[in-house]
Image (cartoon, grey):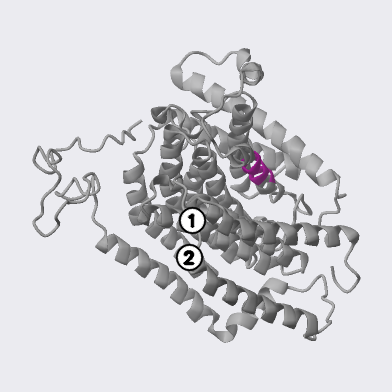
Amino acid sequence: MSGLAVWAAPLLVAVLLAGGVYAAAVIDLATGRSVAGTGLGPSALLQPFRRAALTVVQRPSATERPDVVMWLLAPALYLGLAAAGLALVPLSPTFAIADVQAGIVVWGTIESLVIVAIFLHGWSANSLQPLLAAYRFLAVGVSYLLLSMFVLIAAAIPAESLATGQIVVSQHGLWNVVRQPLGLPLFLIVALGSATWGPLNVADGTDLAGGTTAEVSGMPLLMWRAARLAMLTSFAATVFLGGWQGPWLPGPLWVAVKTLLVLVVLAAAGHRFARVPTERFVTICWVVLLPLSFVDLAVAGVGAL
Amino acid sequence: MSGAQPSLVVHGAFWVFALVAVVSGWRVFRTDSMVRATFLLLASFLNVGAILLLLGGAYLGIALLFMMTVEMTVMAVFMVAFMMNPAGLNPMSMVHQPRVAAVAGWAVFAGGAAVAVWGRFPRRPLDPAADVIGALGTELMGRSMLIFETAGVALVATMIGSVVLSSRRSRFGDEAGDIGSLPPMLDSAAGTYPPGVVSEPAGAGHHGSHGDHS
């Protein structure tokens, strides 16, 4: 479907991702201020740049004998995965940057590689707090990953296709958020986990002095933070909510509006809810949420019959 | 990729992927850390998956990437958890039975290479519009699709159920709240812990100092 030149696709992804990272940063600041009751103010628009500049001028820190290659590659991998995820999102009836047949399987691969990237980021620093955070995240990640698989398969059933474009088309008239009400909340849990955000910020939590980022500063830290925001954006865009469908506005604009809406929900969750205790979340994940995702799949299956 | 000769980019990509696959596969056995070995093996598999994608096996390639990623991640956890190597950071040898492994490895390589060199491969250009994924699913499962799919979900449910039934919770579950928070017994027959470890009644609460409350 997409007739995009080879050089144009990465450029477009980069532009969308940069916009997404900025929007996510501003939304996060704004929701944080709103929750704290300190008044929004226009300074939230400039704050992300100030913070970025401050981070960049800091000296990159070093630990004793880290795995340098993995330590540097982990943020790049994380950011690259967010970009790949965003590329799969259908922007209009005839256009997605990467219109692949097995779209949701690619998305599943991205989610699982995210776990690898975050784990290696903590592991390779060769330091206590990042290592604890990495293993803690791995337990959480392996638990939520399975949820996402069933939710994605459920979304594919009415579309009779693994392609994201077809899944959006299949929601014409009746969005999946109504047809499969369990899908969205479960997928948002996966989003919070994959961006290691808010209640599921087990990898970079302040309780472990920043977790995997405890020993990181300067440019690598900026990269990592940008990658987390990018991942949040990528997930928010992938929720679809009917994708490009909607009255009056052109398709891509609807995708942007819906993405920003989901970002607000995710950012608000980050400021509203306390971090989950790892062990309890893992139990809840396997005992409560996973059966719920089975129900979601069963509902989708029965609906398709 | 259908019919026509593959472009120079595809050729170049093939050689890059192939080289990285072989080199990272070799490094698996030369590195000294569980975690590095696992993720080098993953890197090798990912590059093989990329080659499958180049060959036009869209679903097979992506499925390989996906499955290997999850599999290697779980393997890393289990290897580190079950071996006496906290965090996978201590140096240790990644090979055992090297002679048997070398003979088996070369034999398999010779077999695969022989097939590649002397085998006759069909040349059937693929229609770009063909539903490759649907055809693959039908080829693999045919009329038993529904049975396989149902059995797959049932199997996952069974696995999870058995883990839930057999697992013993440590901090938030049952009365034996200190499981996992104590070092192993010195003498399991007599049931004695190292002196000074159990100084308070079990289940009293503040054992480990994991501190994952926010």
| Residue A60 x %, y % | 61, 24
Three-letter residue code for mark 1:
Ser
Quadrant in which residue B191 is drawn: bottom left
Is residue A288 visible in the rendered image? The answer is yes
How far is disc 2 from disc 1 in space, using C-alphas?
8 Å
Residue A79 shown in magenta: yes
The residue beneath circle 1 is B93
Q: Is residue B90 magenta?
A: no
Task: Tell me: residue B30, above or below residue B181.
Answer: below
Q: Residue at x 35, y 63 (%)?
A: B160
* Residue A261 visible in the picture: no
User: In this rendering, is residue A112 above or below A203?
Assistant: below
Q: Are marks 2 and 1 in contact (CB under 8 Å)?
A: yes
**Quadrant in the rendering for residue B171:** top left
Question: Magenta stretch?
Answer: A76-83
- Left or right of A139: which side holds A236? right
Chain identifier of the residue bearing label 2 in the image = B
Q: Residue at x 14, y 49 (%)?
A: B175
Q: In this orientation, which residue lies closer to the viewer: B75 or A32?
A: B75
Magenta region, main secondary structure: helix
Q: Which residue is mark 2?
A: B96
